[in-house]
Amino acid sequence: MVICVKNKKEEEKFVIQVQNITKKYGSFTALDAINFEIKEGEIVGFLGPNGAGKSTTMNIITGFIEPTSGKVIVDGNDVSKKPKKAKQQIGYMPEGVPLYGDLTVKEFVTYMAEIKGVKRKEKKEKVEKILEETGLLDVKNKLTKNLSRGYKQRVSMAGALVGDPKVIILDEPTVGLDPKQVTEIRALIKDLGKNHTVILSSHILSEVSQICNRVIIINKGKIVAVDTPEHLEQKVIKDNSIYVTVEDPENKMLKIKEKLEKVEDIKLISQNEDKTKKYIITAEKDVDLRKSLFETLAKEGITIFEMKKADATLEDAFMQLINKPEEGGKE
Ligand code: ADP
Ligand code: MG
């Protein structure tokens, strides 16, 4: 007799597994051996600055582009070996809302249903259901090219929902929208999250913390953190960093580390138009650097314009994570 014991681990099913994916464009490495997994039902935020590799990753998961090495498994199907099966489980909304402008909203969604092979009998009903889900019933007979940006985004999302995919992938779904539209689209995404696994990319931190259960932070083709928004915020409190904005024409900032006891790292974050520069300075735990910074910088002839302790905001967590020293910067 065989007794089959199912443990908890097995029940927690991964719907997406990204294994050691590397993508090179010539000699440039856009993705450098990234790994992560997504469980069924999660809403995961893919967060990173422009050029981090978010779209490239999404294009690889959806099978639009081939990785240089590594593999992606969607709902148990290797994307390169069983592309059809894998793609069936994914609804993709690419960057920049590509639509066919001369189709009406309903025609577009119907067309998507044809491409995805939705059965003829079910087509009408399914299209109608999606139009309702995405709040498009009122505009279903309008040409997509005449819609506002917010509505175009909805149409593009409707296209992604066709065929009842398990996973919905949305690349920067709120880019270019006005604040009201942003709020509406975010609410729509949360709603979709009730019945789908959702992966969305964004370079807006507050957005991701509002919508997502988990955040994957990517920078320069590498994953720098995978965590819940809450944990990321807590990390900052522990990490103990200070932001300083200075006028430093002789570029002395990076050389003063030796002069400051207990400083672990100094990194340039941004150069402002008024020629001031913003740095993040990380110290050992429980050290308050502000006094010694004030004195040392004054001695070096570096003028402080602003000094601020890093708060426990996701914004700061993000800044710290993507500005960590190369070695040991990964968790
Ligand atoms: P993100 O979506 O995070 O802004 P992308 O994934 O679009 O970033 O791009 C990651 C990096 O790869 C960028 O430096 C980008 O310039 C580069 N890249 C993307 N597509 C190509 C391509 N087809 N050819 C060459 N470089 C590319
Ligand atoms: Mg992108």
Image (cartoon, rainbow, N blue to C red):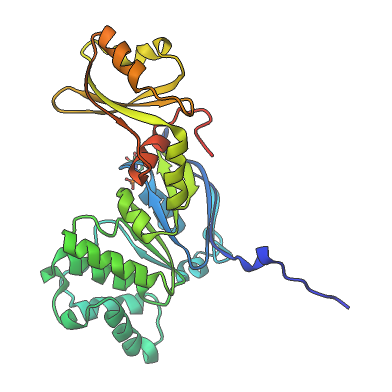
In terms of depth relative to the viewer, which is nearer, 52 or 94? 52
| Left/right of residue 150 with respect to residue 160 in the rendered view | left
Q: Tell me if residue 65 can be seen.
A: no
In terms of depth relative to the viewer, which is nearer, 329 or 122? 329
Residue appearing at x 33%, y 49% in the figure: 205
Query: As displayed, is residue 84 above or below residue 21?
Result: below
| Left/right of residue 167 with respect to residue 80 in the rendered view | left
Query: Which image quarter holds the N terminus?
Result: bottom right
Query: As displayed, is residue 19 above or below residue 310?
Result: below
Residue appearing at x 52%, y 70% in the figure: 85
Query: As displayed, is residue 79 above or below residue 102?
Result: above
Count of marks, rendered view = 0
Give how far across and how far down residue 221 sits, in percent. Answer: 43, 40
Give how far across and how far down residue 248 sits, in percent. Answer: 23, 15
Residue appearing at x 36%, y 68% in the figure: 190
Residue that sits furthest to the bottom in the current view: 121
Give how far across and how far down residue 44 sits, in percent. Answer: 43, 58
In terms of depth relative to the viewer, which is nearer, 19 or 267? 267
Residue appearing at x 49%, y 48% in the figure: 226
